[in-house]
Image (cartoon, rainbow, N blue to C red):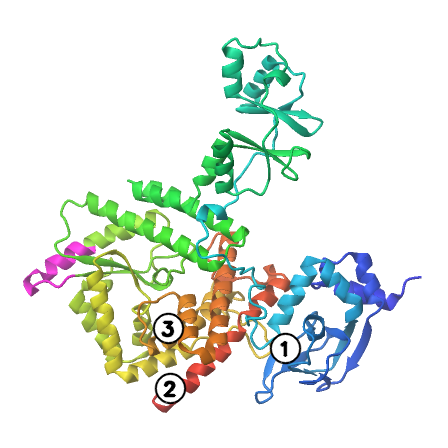
Amino acid sequence: MKNTISQRVADFLKNFPPFSFLKQRDLELISEQITIIYKEKDSVVFAENEETHNSFYVVHKGAVALRGNHENEILDMCDEGDIFGLRPLIANENYKMEARTYEESILYAIPISVFKPYALENKAVGNFLIESFASNTLNPFSKSHRGKLYGEESLEADTKLLDLQEVKYSKKIVSCIATTTAKEAAEIMRHKNVGAILVVEETFPIGIITDKDLRNKIVTGEFQITTPVSEIMTSPVITYPTKMTVTQAQIAMMKSDISHLCLTIDGTSNSKAVGMLSKHDVMVSIGNNPAVLLREIKRAKKFKKIKQIRASIIHLLQGYLDQNIPMTLITKIISELNDACTKQVIAIVLKKTETSPPVKFSWLALGSQGRSEQLLLTDQDNALIYEDVPEELEAETKKYFLELSARINKGLFEIGYDYCPAEMMASNPNWCMSLSDYKTKIHHWITNTGKNEVLLSFIFFDYSLSFGDTELVNNLSDFIFEDVKANPTFYIHLVSGALQSQSPTGFFREFLLEQDGAHKDFFNIKNRALMPLADAARVLILSHSVKSISNTAERFEKLAELEPNNSELYTACAYSYKALLKFRTKQGLLHNDSGQYIALNTLSKAEKIKLKSTFKTIKELQEIIRVRFNPSNIL
């Protein structure tokens, strides 16, 4: 007769990770060893610095607050299905936080000795426990956990891009046996429309015949058409494992001067053949290589062609995410390709324009593209700066560049970038001006520090040059930094603006959702998670007068160098930002949109835990800014 209590425990646990990764029978065995604990409100489960228990805990009903030593601050709130107290399972040291019931609660105490074997044997269970443990620490991206969240494994800096891509191969093997005649083999190849046929004994490859073999050995008359394939096949077969990169496949074919590879289970001819790889397959894979795509972009003569290449870039992005390539490398590659698309659109427009630009100009990427963080196709954010001209030529010059900008914006729209709803585009007269006019406008923003002025000024700390004259951009950058130094009050307003970013979660660690509008009840990952980090990075990097870095993660990495005492936090922020960007990108690709708004009911418990773990740095980061600059003293 089944233990009904343990059965109910198992039925509850199977709905939550990591228990959902276990087999039902294993879960039932574990449940038989679980202790059910009742705790009144405000009861201590374990205290800070207390020796670890022999169990970790799952909240069945109620809520448990995890508190740090800083004014008894609540660092985390665990509710139904959440696990806590994992330190004895992961690290052999005393508890670093206090766990106290926030309300009347029922807990399941799971013995470490019972559960540990499952964590060691089941990779999904082990990974989830590591992530959960890290998400309940003060710094989820600390050195001890770094590289275990969101798959941000490190790669050598000189990793070749081709080596990152697995080659695609055919799993539909066309084969025959040794006694098949050359004529029969040729008919099979023609019917299947393939250039090679594998000769097998049972499922093991013993030889291969290609079009080249038929030409050289049969058509020449060297062998009769009725000859068994065993006499004309190439043997032994050169075999490789299925996990091959494009470069490895190319090298293998060049090394043996062959056009086809046979792929087997263990990479030897003594195991089952599972795939065939041809030179054509390799060339198709190379077509999605960034170096090849970059060359194709530069050769494109029409917007339609660039749009087709943009589709390949998205395919490449999806492949990189599937292969778990680090976000640092992904953003560099995709940003470079996106930038190349913009450059080529401008080049095509200029070539079609009857008159050359009257003076030097620069096309600026703003917003996420300016920070090299635009991975998905979003709306346009751009501006154009042109060289100063005499007053009598200003109207005519501006007219020329506005018309040019309109054609460029249209071209960008045709390759997939929507028009900016706020018209923050170079075709807008407010974003197409001479260098002097930009300086006048930006000076007005800096010396008239209203909310709108501060928000607009953010844009000109994140831009990057997409096309045109470098000196114009450097001139404007120098002016902005000098003007900010001369107006310290503005910087405090800038700080205040960064602190206005909304929190990702409420008091009970629940996601704060949109309250109205088209995205009501959705989570805005851009405004509530990414932007608080981006705004803080901008403010802090400006305080060190660093103007050559616009990428948010790179700003945090530079700050870690500049402020060794805060190195751990800034490094955590860089990892958090990349993790959030990866999460948004995956959501965008999944739903074919910008990924900005996320329906939480589509996320698993594990995904929510991973997402929340990235939020922990935001509050601490904003507190550093608040204490360091104390904007309340001036505003």
Which badge, 3 or 1, comes first in the chain's sequence?
A: 1
> Label 3 vs label 1: CA separation?
30 Å
Q: Residue at x 32, y 81 (%)?
A: 491
> Label 3 vs label 2: CA separation?
16 Å
Which badge, 3 or 2, comes first in the chain's sequence?
A: 3
Q: Residues within 10 Å of mark 2 (few under 14, many from 20)?
A: some
Disc 3 and disc 1 in contact, CB within 8 angstroms: no
Residue 49 percent across, percent down from the top left: 67, 85
Residue 537 percent across, percent down from the top left: 40, 73
Q: How many marks?
A: 3
Q: Residue at x 71, y 27 (%)?
A: 202
Tell me which corner region of the image, top left, top right, bottom left or bottom right, holds residue 275: top right
State the residue position of label 1: 77
State the residue position of label 2: 631
- Which residues are drawn in magenta? 387-402
Which badge, 1 or 2, comes first in the chain's sequence?
A: 1
- Which of discs 3 and 1 lies nearer the camera? The answer is 3
Magenta-highlighted stretch: main secondary structure?
Answer: helix
Q: Secondary structure at mark 2?
A: helix
Residue type marked 1: Met
Tell me which corner region of the image, top left, top right, bottom left or bottom right, holds residue 394: bottom left
Q: Pick out the residue farthest to the right.
A: 1
State the residue position of label 3: 538
Residue type marked 2: Pro
Q: Residue at x 61, y 67 (%)?
A: 609
Q: Nearer the viewer, residue 418 or 119?
A: 119
Query: Where is the C terminus found, in terms of image quarters?
Result: bottom left
Residue 57 percent across, percent down from the top left: 73, 74
Q: Residue at x 51, y 20 (%)?
A: 211
Q: Nearer the viewer, residue 349 or 514?
A: 349
Residue type marked 3: Arg
Disc 1 and disc 2 in contact, CB within 8 angstroms: no
